[in-house]
Image: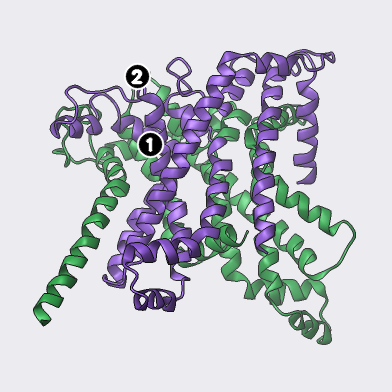
Chain colours: A green, B purple
């Protein structure tokens, strides 16, 4: 009796593990392929039949990327833009969310509606006017063009999430600070913000990811090589001379490292924060 | 932020009723001419059709894959560590920029690439296929790439949803003699329905707006077979410098999105 039960359990386990492995192959193989290709030489990439593990394992592609000031500049640009967007978004979102959560003011509801509906405006609709606007404001081909544009896309989500977070914190906290002689600003920065760190981290990561990965506006609002970000840089490699696939793969690996690290370190916040937002809306 | 979204929308609408703005120093009012130009363009309708195919197939496949993977990962037969490991692998596609996804798949789908090699070795095809540059396969190929890149978002949300379903619902169903398929149909699906609808609507909104993936894999080609509304509009503006016609097309896309998001917001409101 017992052995048949165990057999059944084993069969069930295999029934789960087999499709799991199949799915993992579907999800993970392309990523694995990117990694092994980045260690090959470019001629080896086109060898047929393809080699899974390279014979002359080398970091040459990485060295080429990191030794080229133009390509290093792509990374610097991406870091500058993404970090600025993240910092500014968080500051503005915290202040706005505090106002939304703790004060009543005129136009609060229509303002809220607008913030929600801004999320639904397709980027391609905003592209042409932004292009015109940035040229007029002489911000075309600057960091600011990208930072301001990205904030339009990151702020609505950040404000909505942050307001939700503050709403869960009791108002007695603020009142306690006021009794101790502090004002609204001390209440916000000394009490509310420190308690909200998990929420702030998840919003911050989400914002960073949007900015780091953005392509359409980075392509349109910058022109010279010294202003391009990593996603555009990867694409530029495709056009340049011949196709240097190993370099492209190496640059892709380098380009996804920040997001990958953020994800691995903050997995818990990340998934919780994201599903909270998407599911509750 | 206000200024940065409302004014541009007003700007794009005003661009769309002028003759060529930005290039032309003193544009004149031309009414709906630009709209007529877009709406009588055959390529526009090709783009609409492609966008519908691309979005429809992607959303359904995202949902099926996302739900299947979420249910596999939610099993109670495996240890926490094993499941955590699989979860990380399954989320991987979602952590890459579209630019990276595009070059990676261009490499894998190239005539001498690994995909062709595997298919030939498996006896499924005889000779290598140029997946992204042949007219018959380009649209399914970009759709496949989009499916690969997009399902993890569903999976994460549905996994959270699955973990929130109370166990006694399943126990009650078992007592009533329901087999696992019936349990899935009568417990799992109804419980996940709100999440599924919300995700599918968001995905429709996002997928119809997909630009980067198409632009970097096929650029809308060959001969428009992968032209989407977004690439069509982009080309009007930044390849042909017809900013006004492009604005008209952008306004049409905006109206389309507004309808979609109206349903989304109404759905969300009705749940609160």
Q: Residues within 10 Å of mark 1 (few under 14, many from 20)?
A: some
Instruction: Evaluate whether residue B171 shows in this view.
Output: yes
Q: Secondary structure at mark 1?
A: helix
**Which quadrant of the view contains residue B205?**
top right
* 1 or 2: tag closer to the N-terminus: 2
Asked whether B30 or A241 is in front, the reply is: B30
Asked whether A262 or B47 is in front, the reply is: B47
Residue A137 locus on image (x, y percent):
77, 31
Instruction: Name which residue lies at 47% across and 65% down.
Output: B160
Instruction: Name which residue lies at 38% across and 59% down.
Output: B70
Q: Say left or right for A66 vs A107.
A: left
Residue A230 locus on image (x, y percent):
48, 38
**Which quadrant of the view contains residue A104?**
bottom right
Quick one: quadrant of the C terminus of chain B?
bottom right
Task: Report, in whole angstroms, how far the alpha carbon at label 1 lies from the one at label 2.
Answer: 15 Å
Residue A157 locus on image (x, y percent):
65, 54
Asked whether B10 or A184 is in front, the reply is: B10
Task: Using the image, determine if residue B78 lies above or below residue B101.
Answer: below
Asked whether B188 or A19 is in front, the reply is: B188
Task: Using the image, determine if residue B167 lies above or below residue A73.
Answer: below
Q: Which residue is mark 1?
A: B144
Q: Chain of mark 1?
A: B
Q: Which mark is residue B134?
A: 2
Q: Say left or right for A99 vs A8.
A: right
Residue B235 locus on image (x, y percent):
58, 20
Q: Residues within 10 Å of mark 2 (few under 14, many from 20)?
A: some
Instruction: Name which residue lies at 60% across and 28% down.
Output: A220
């Amino acid at each position: 009796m017992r052995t048949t039960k165990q057999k059944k359990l084993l069969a069930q386990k295999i029934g789960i593990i087999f499709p799991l492995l199949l799915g993992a192959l579907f999800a993970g193989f392309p990523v694995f392929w990117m990694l092994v290709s980045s260690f090959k030489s470019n001629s080896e990439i086109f060898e047929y039949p393809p080699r899974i593990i390279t014979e002359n394992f080398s970091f040459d592609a990485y060295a080429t990327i990191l030794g080229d000031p133009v390509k290093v500049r792509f990374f610097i640009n991406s870091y500058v833009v993404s970090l600025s967007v993240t910092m500014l978004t968080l500051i503005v979102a915290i202040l706005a969310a505090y106002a939304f959560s703790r004060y009543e003011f005129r136009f609060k509801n229509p303002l809220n509606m607008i913030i929600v509906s801004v999320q639904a405006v397709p980027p391609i609709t905003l592209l042409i006017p932004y292009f015109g606007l940035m040229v007029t404001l002489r911000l075309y081909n600057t960091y600011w063009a990208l930072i301001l544009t990205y904030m339009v896309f990151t702020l609505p989500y950040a404000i909505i999430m942050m307001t939700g977070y503050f709403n869960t914190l009791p108002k007695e906290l603020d009142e306690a600070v006021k009794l101790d002689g502090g004002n609204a600003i001390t209440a916000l920065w000394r009490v509310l913000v420190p308690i909200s760190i998990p929420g702030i981290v998840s919003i911050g990561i989400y914002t960073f990811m949007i900015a780091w990965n953005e392509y359409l506006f980075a392509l349109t609002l910058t022109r010279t090589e010294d202003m391009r970000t990593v996603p555009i840089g990867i694409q530029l490699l495709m056009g340049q001379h011949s196709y240097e696939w190993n370099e492209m793969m190496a640059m892709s690996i380098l380009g996804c490292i920040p997001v990958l690290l953020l994800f691995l370190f903050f997995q818990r916040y990340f998934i919780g924060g994201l599903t909270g937002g998407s599911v509750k809306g | 932020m206000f200024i940065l979204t409302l004014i541009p929308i007003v700007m794009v609408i005003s661009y769309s009723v002028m003759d060529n703005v930005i290039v032309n120093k003193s544009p004149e009012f031309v009414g709906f001419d630009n709209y007529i130009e877009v709406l009588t363009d055959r390529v526009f309708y090709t783009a609409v059709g492609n966008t519908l195919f691309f979005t429809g197939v992607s959303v359904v496949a995202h949902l099926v894959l996302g739900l299947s993977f979420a249910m596999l990962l939610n099993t109670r037969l495996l240890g926490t560590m094993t499941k955590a490991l699989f979860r990380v692998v399954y989320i991987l596609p979602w952590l890459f920029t579209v630019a990276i996804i595009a070059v990676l798949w261009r490499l894998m789908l190239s005539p001498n690439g690994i995909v062709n090699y595997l298919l030939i070795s498996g006896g499924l095809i005889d000779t290598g296929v140029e997946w992204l540059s042949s007219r018959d396969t380009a649209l399914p190929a970009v759709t496949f790439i989009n499916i690969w890149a997009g399902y993890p978002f569903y999976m994460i949300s549905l996994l959270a949803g699955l973990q929130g379903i109370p166990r006694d619902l399943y126990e009650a169903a078992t007592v009533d003699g329901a087999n696992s398929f019936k349990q899935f149909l009568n417990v799992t699906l109804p419980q996940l329905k709100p999440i599924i609808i919300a995700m599918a609507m968001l995905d429709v909104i996002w997928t119809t707006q997909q630009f980067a993936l198409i632009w970097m894999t096929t650029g809308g080609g060959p001969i428009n077979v992968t032209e989407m509304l977004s690439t069509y509009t982009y080309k009007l503006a930044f390849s042909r410098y017809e900013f006004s016609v492009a604005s008209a097309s952008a306004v049409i896309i905006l109206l389309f999105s507004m309808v979609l998001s109206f349903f989304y917001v109404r759905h969300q409101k009705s749940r609160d």
